[in-house]
Amino acid sequence: MLICGVDEAGRGPLIGAVFTAAVILDPARPITGLADSKKLSEARRTALAIEIREKALAWCIARADAAEIDQLNIFQATMVAMVRAVDGLSVVPGMVLIDGNKIPKTLTLPAEAIVKGDAKVQEISAASILAKTARDAEMIALDAIHPQYGFARHKGYPTAEHMKALLEYGVLAEHRRSFAPVREALGLQQGSLF
């Protein structure tokens, strides 16, 4: 039975999309060193992401953008993006293993949620690496357009540097307006909180 691993990256940042990935590994083409993406160096993640794309039987990266996050909430937007990733696979898996403790309600395939799955299941580790590298690439691209915010360094998380830039330079179109620090920055920009 083909197993698909699913994971997300970018639920906590104040800006940009939440990324998800679905991966079906090829048992005939093993990949060594798969682990939770947060435990790997950036260089190792990048190298593994290339290898996963080359060797996996199927993979798909999906996203839900800031507008969807604001409309649905971050949890529901993540669930939508997970279903998009699974639906985008070129091969239909027999079982979907999802990192965490929730299964998207609209997923039509047999599925199981596994807490800390990115450290326990290779397919989920692979998905975590693809989601994280795709999300980081978006932040690096955004940094090239808006270097004063420091996105390449903090990847959109609410660091002191990001908070200072938010107040100094304002809220960008890509910022998640439903997140409290962004709402507060908007309120200060407009002279009143809403």
Image (spheres, helix red, strand yellow):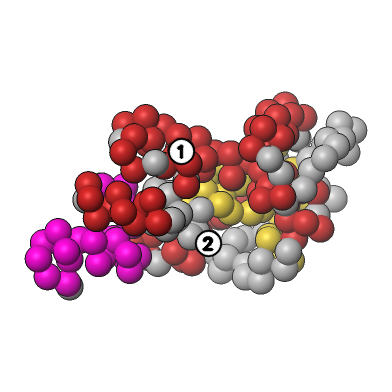
What residue range appears in magenta? 171-193
Residue 58: percent from left, percent from top:
70, 37
In this view of the protein, which residue sits in the foreground, 1 or 70?
A: 70
Q: Are marks 2 and 1 in contact (CB under 8 Å)?
A: no
At 72% from the left edge and 68% from the top edge, which residue is drawn?
Answer: 115
Q: Local crowd at mark 1 within 10 Å, few (<14), some, or many (≥20)? A: some
At 47% from the left edge and 47% from the top edge, which residue is drawn?
Answer: 154
Count numbered badges in the picture: 2
Residue 73: percent from left, percent from top:
40, 67
Mark number for residue 56? none
The residue wearing badge 2 is: 79
Q: Residue 121 is drawn in which quadrant?
A: bottom right
**Vertically, is 172 above or below 106?**
above
**Vertically, is 187 above or below 88?**
below
**Vertically, is 68 above or below 134?**
below
Cα distance in 3D space between marks 2 and 1? 26 Å
User: Which secondary structure, mark 2?
Assistant: helix
Three-letter residue code for mark 1: Ala
Residue 44: percent from left, percent from top:
71, 35
106 displayed left or right of 124:
left
User: Does label 2 or label 1 sit earlier along the sequence?
Assistant: 2
Residue 134: percent from left, percent from top:
54, 39
Q: Is residue 172 magenta?
A: yes
In this view of the protein, which residue sits in the foreground, 163 or 30?
A: 163
User: Which secondary structure, mark 1?
Assistant: helix
Q: Can residue 12 be seen from the camera position used here?
A: yes
Q: Can residue 127 be seen from the camera position used here?
A: no
Three-letter residue code for mark 2: Met
Q: Residue 167 is drawn in which quadrant?
A: bottom left
* Foreground label between 2 and 1: 1
